[in-house]
Image (cartoon, rainbow, N blue to C red):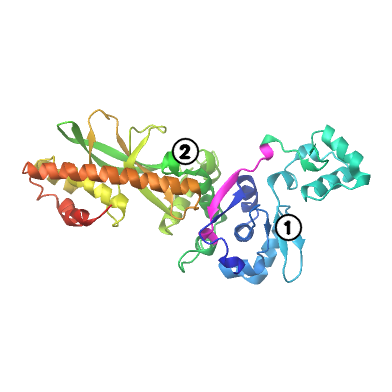
């Protein structure tokens, strides 16, 4: 098995702070770093991937790939362990990169050498034992019961991992790798946004990228109260972003308040157009950031479970309306959802979600829970629609519902 074939369907990790530093070096070094990181072992450090892998998985030429790798080495984020035709590199942790630990800059050259020895997992030599003891007393090293030494990490030195899917670099099913697609945009900040979104995405809690950072707003309209339900209509209004977290670096200087976030939205739109970020409307208990998610409301763009759920909700709502109300909903292109009346502050919020997801246990658990939730609500909406037909409700004006009704009935979710 070749290195390119290893870890298929898996994931790798990079440190958020290192990624910020790498993006400041330019587009090609950032692309090269992701390729090197894709080939790392379980320690997310050592890699045998090199210029050849950069050339194979991106449009960066061999010469420029070599130059980008040298920039990474000169900047202190990558260390060459072995040169030659089969090179090996070490992607240095944040705590071991030059300039990341100002409190250690006052150490002597011998003390620095001992720290480097320990960080490379090499035993301290006998003539350096006294220096090692001094470093233990000063809090730079820790000594185990067997006499071995490890670097003493401060809380801020702990890894701040961004977990990334292997497909980000190597692609899936013969597709152009996402890293290469974004590289072709020739904007390192667009690539930084894509990777930063993985750090900001919490599928279990937020259904995607935190809506405390970026989200889509929908206007809400009450269409009808029926029995224990209120039929709400939702229509897209605007996209929003807060100047926080991964969005901060995309804002323009303070003096340009009118268009301060224009670069953020331009890059976010690029990622959506490339198919790397998708927007999914979610029904939530209110428009507050900490409101709980109820279920996704797909807008009928595919035969996927989320879209079928959105269409089933629309059909259920349509079964509760009069012909005149149906005509209004169809003319206004509403997304309709019947909601229990006690959930009075319900809202629809568009949540950004990354198309490629690292196949971690957490992601798998979210996917299973989300499908279970969707199937439960799908059954409930179908039951409501059947009750409406039993009452003889006229849904002939609901062209959207009729178009999908027969297909919805055939789905076996």
In the drawing, what numbered circle is on residue 254? none
The span shown in magenta is 156-169
| Residue drawn at the location 67% of the way across and 37% of the way down | 156
Q: Does the residue at mark 2 contact the one at mark 1 (Cβ under 8 Å)?
A: no
- Badge 2 marks a residue whose secondary structure is loop
**Outermost residue to the left:** 392
Q: Is residue 81 visible?
A: yes
Which residue in the structure is indicated by mark 2? 242
Of tags 2 and 1, the one toward the viewer is 1
Residue 106 vs residue 128, the one in the foreground: 128
Label 2 to label 1: alpha-carbon separation: 35 Å
**Is 20 left or right of 213, judged from the image as shown?**
right
The residue lying at 75 percent from left, 40 percent from top is 101
Determine if the magenta segment contains residue 161.
Answer: yes
Residue located beneath label 1 in the image: 73
Expressed as whole percent of the image width and height from the top left, the position of residue 36 reads 64, 60
* In this rendering, position of residue 314 left or right of residue 83: left
Query: Circle 1: is it few (<14), some (14-19), or many (20+) Cα within 10 Å?
Result: some
Q: Secondary structure at mark 1?
A: helix
The image quadrant that residue 66 belongs to is: bottom right
Residue 236 drawn in magenta: no
Any part of residue 58 in sight: no
């Amino acid at each position: 098995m070749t290195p390119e074939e290893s870890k298929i369907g898996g994931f790798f990790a990079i440190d958020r702070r290192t990624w910020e530093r790498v993006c400041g070096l330019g587009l090609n070094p950032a692309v090269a770093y992701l390729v090197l990181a894709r080939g790392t072992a379980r320690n997310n450090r050592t890699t045998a991937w090199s210029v050849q892998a950069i050339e194979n998985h991106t449009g960066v030429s061999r010469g420029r790939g070599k130059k980008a790798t040298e920039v990474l080495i000169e900047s202190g984020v990558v260390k060459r362990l072995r040169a030659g035709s089969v090179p090996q590199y070490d992607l240095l942790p944040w705590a071991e990169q030059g300039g990341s630990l100002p409190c250690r800059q006052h150490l002597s050259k011998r003390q620095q050498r001992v720290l480097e020895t320990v960080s490379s997992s090499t035993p301290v030599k006998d003539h350096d034992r006294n220096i090692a003891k001094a470093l233990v007393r000063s809090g730079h090293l820790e000594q185990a019961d067997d006499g071995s030494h490890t670097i003493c990490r401060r809380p801020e030195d702990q890894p701040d991992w961004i977990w990334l899917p292997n497909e980000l670099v190597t692609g899936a099913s013969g597709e152009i790798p996402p890293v290469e697609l974004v590289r072709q945009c020739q904007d390192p900040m667009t690539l930084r946004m894509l990777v930063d979104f993985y750090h900001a995405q919490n599928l279990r809690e937020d259904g995607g990228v935190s809506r405390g950072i970026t989200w889509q707003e929908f206007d809400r309209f009450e269409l009808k109260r029926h029995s224990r339900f209120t039929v709400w209509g939702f229509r897209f209004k605007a996209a929003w972003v807060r100047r926080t977290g991964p969005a901060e670096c995309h804002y323009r200087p303070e003096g340009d308040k009118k268009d301060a976030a224009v670069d953020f939205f331009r890059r976010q739109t690029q990622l959506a157009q490339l198919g790397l970020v998708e927007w999914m409307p979610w029904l939530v208990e209110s428009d507050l950031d900490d409101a709980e998610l109820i279920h996704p409301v797909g807008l009928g763009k595919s035969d996927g479970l989320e879209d079928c759920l959105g269409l089933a909700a629309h059909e259920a709502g349509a079964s509760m309306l009069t012909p005149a109300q149906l005509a209004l909903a169809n003319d206004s292109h509403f997304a309709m959802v019947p909601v229990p009346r006690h959930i009075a502050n319900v809202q629809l919020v568009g949540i950004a979600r990354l198309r490629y997801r690292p196949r971690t246990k957490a992601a798998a658990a979210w996917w299973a829970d989300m499908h279970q939730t969707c199937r439960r609500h799908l059954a409930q909406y179908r039951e409501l629609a059947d009750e409406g037909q039993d009452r003889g409700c006229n849904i002939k004006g609901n062209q959207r519902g009729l178009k999908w009704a027969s297909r919805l009935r055939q789905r076996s979710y």
